Amino acid sequence: MQRAVGHRQFSRGFTLIEVLVVLLIVGMAGSLLFEGAAQVMAMQGRFNRQLENLRGQSLRADWLRQVVQGLQPDYHDGRNKFRGSAKEASGLTTNPLSASYAGLAPFTLAVQRDVPRGEMVLRYGTDKNAPELLRWAGDIGRLRYADTKGEVHDSWPPPLGLWPQLPEAVFLEGGQRTAMWLVVATPYGPIWPKPRPVDILGSMGNKP
C-alpha cells in the first residue's frame, strides 16, 4: 500500500527590505507630486498677480481715455485752451477725475520720471503727489498728437499752420526701447467751441 504524502502550502509574506523599498518608492513619488503641485500653485499665483496687474493697468488706461474723450475746446479768449507737449497736456474736459465728474473742468496730464525706481509715471496733475494714472518700467514716456490726416506731432497745436483747438487723437507711448506700447485716446467733443453771441456780433453781443 502506498501512503499518500500530503503537500503543505506555505504563504510567503513581504520581507522587511521589500517593505522598505516600497515605502521609499511611495515616498519619492509623493515628494515629486507635492513638488509638482507646489510649482503649479506658484505658477498660478504669479499668473493671477500678473493678470490683476494687467487688469489694473487696463483700468488706469481707461481713465486716460475717459479724460481725453471728454475734451472740450475753450473760447479763443479763454485760459484753458488745449495745449500739448511731449511731457504735458492741459485743457478742459467733461470727464475730470474729481468730484465734479461730468462737469466741465480744467485738467493737466504730466509724464514724469521716477528716477529712484527707474520708472515712468503719468499723473493727473503736475505735482509729484498728484494721482497716478499709469506707471511703467522703462525710460520712455511721451504724449503725441494726431491731426485729421493721421499725421502725428510732438506738440499741439503744431508750430506752423492753422489747426483746430483739439487734436484728432492723443497718444501715450511708453516702455523700453526693446518693448514699446501705445495707448490711443480720442476726443468725442467738438474741435471748436460753440459760438457765443459776442463772437458772432462782436461788441454788440454784449448789449442787452
Image (cartoon, rainbow, N blue to C red):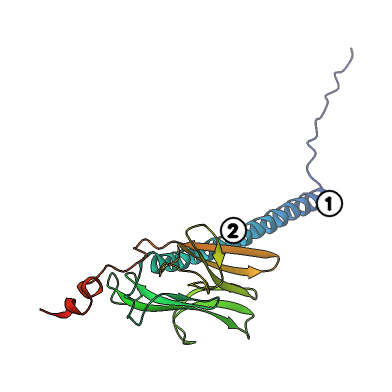
Q: CA distance from mark 2 to mark 1?
A: 40 Å
* Residue ID for mark 2: 44
Residue 67 - label: none
User: Residue placed at 52% from the left, 72% from the top?
Assistant: 160
* Image coords of residue 107 (percent x, y): 39, 78
* Image coords of residue 5 (percent x, y): 86, 22
Q: Nearer the viewer, residue 3 or 62?
A: 62
Q: Nearer the viewer, residue 50 or 151?
A: 151
The residue positioned farthest toward the right in the image shown: 2
Q: Using the rendered view, name the quadrant where residue 192 is placed.
A: bottom left
Residue 17 - label: 1
* Image coords of residue 129 (percent x, y): 46, 86
Tags 2 and 1 touching, CB below 8 Å:
no
Q: Secondary structure at mark 2?
A: helix
Q: Is residue 172 left or right of residue 66?
A: right
User: Residue placed at 78% from the left, 36% from the top?
Assistant: 11
The residue positioned farthest toward the left in the image shown: 208
Q: Is residue 7 left or right of residue 109?
A: right
Amino acid type shown at disc 2: Gln
Q: Secondary structure at mark 1?
A: helix
* Image coords of residue 147 (percent x, y): 49, 62
Amino acid type shown at disc 1: Ile
Q: Tell me the quadrant of the picture where the N terminus can be found.
A: top right
The residue carrying pointer 2 sits among few (fewer than 14), some (14 to 19) or many (20 or more) residues within 10 Å by Cα, namely few
Q: Is residue 76 left or right of residue 114?
A: left
Q: Using the rendered view, name the quadrant where residue 165 is placed.
A: bottom left
